[in-house]
Amino acid sequence: MIAFFKHYPTYQIFLTAILALVITAILTPLWIKVLRKEGLGQVVRIDGPQKHLNKSGTPTMGGIIILFTVVITYSLIASASRAGMVAIFTLLTCGFLGFIDDYRKVVKARSLGLRARAKITWQLVIAIVVGLAAVNFAGLSTDISIPLTGIVIPLDYLSLKFSIANISIVIPFLYIALVMFYITATTNTVNFTDGLDGLAAGTITISMLAFVGIAFQQGRLDLAIISAAIGGACIGFLWFNSHPASIFMGDTGSLGLGGAIAIMSILTKTELLLVLIGGIYVIEGLSVIGQIISYRWFKVRILKMAPIHHHFEMLGWSETQIMMRFWIVAALLAGLGFGAYFAMAAGGS
């Protein structure tokens, strides 16, 4: 049946999303049982919203099922490509870093997990490897397009070229720096967003739907399938992660899927449009930065609690209200990014 669908790419993408949804929906309750049996539950920070303390002990590391489903679905449906391999590598390496963080939380009972410096250091290492692989293995251009202007900025001014065993290697320092920023920023802001039941899974699905359309328009079926697999898996996971959640994705999920969002923008050459497509994460990240700066410099908190979704909790909004309204904002921003891309494509920019 899968071979039949390969002749119809739109159905292939649809099949990918449905298959990922079904696999996740089947495996997640089984994983919940395993986690409960082993006593591997969320350790809730005492400095967060007090009503979240009753979530302590809820099974976590559900991201393992999401990542496993994406890899299996991609392997079954897509034809392997170099860009696809780079995307899967990013997903798994960022997810593995998140797994280490989760392990330290649930097994070592450290609610903060990895130290921030260690986490960022490893994210930068992963980003350097991903950037080099994208350029040298997948043949990615280092040019950046400014949306709706037709302006293209080459980022190969400062590059080092050399050969090893007759293999040419290019290190475009400026572009690698951009990849480092994108991967570290996106993984961490998606991680910030994963603070309410269903919030991260829903917004990730929305962002991935935009990348499905962009990749498909570019003729990048491999990337469209990965995006569809992530979106489908997140929808299947939402059945158990919606309020009140039976399981959390943990840092395994939020860091892995954050890395996937970043690499999709890089591989589809929509780097600057990520500000819109992943706009909800920009808002979450800026809320944290703004809170830190305002308190350290002026001893004033601009929010009742950061990230911003906790601010609305403190104002009395329910988790479901925040989740749905943030989904709407995420959809509006992703829709704007999606529309801007097609305007660029139609204008040849």
Image (tube, rainbow, N blue to C red):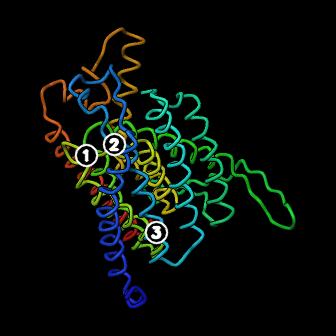
Categorize mark 2 by other alpha carbons within 10 Å: few (<14), some (14-19), many (20+): many
Q: Residue furthest top?
A: 299
Give the Cα separation between the discs numbered 2 and 3: 23 Å
User: Answer yes or no: do the residues labelled 2 and 1 have beta carbons within 8 Å?
Assistant: yes
Q: 340 and 97: which one is in front?
A: 97
Identified by mark 1, the residue type is Ser
Q: Mark 2, mark 3: which one is toward the viewer? A: 2
**Dot placed on the residue nearer the N-terminal end, 2 or 3:** 2
Vertical relation: 185 (above or below) 217: above
Q: Is residue 343 left or right of residue 3?
A: left
Vertical relation: 160 (above or below) 211: above
Q: 47 and 265: which one is in front?
A: 47
Identified by mark 2, the residue type is Pro
Rendering coords of residue 332 (x, y %)? 23, 52
On residue 246, the disc is 1
Residue at position x 47%, y 34% from top? 107
Rendering coords of residue 284 (x, y %)? 33, 36
Categorize mark 1 by other alpha carbons within 10 Å: few (<14), some (14-19), many (20+): some
Q: Which residue is mark 2?
A: 59
On residue 72, the disc is 3
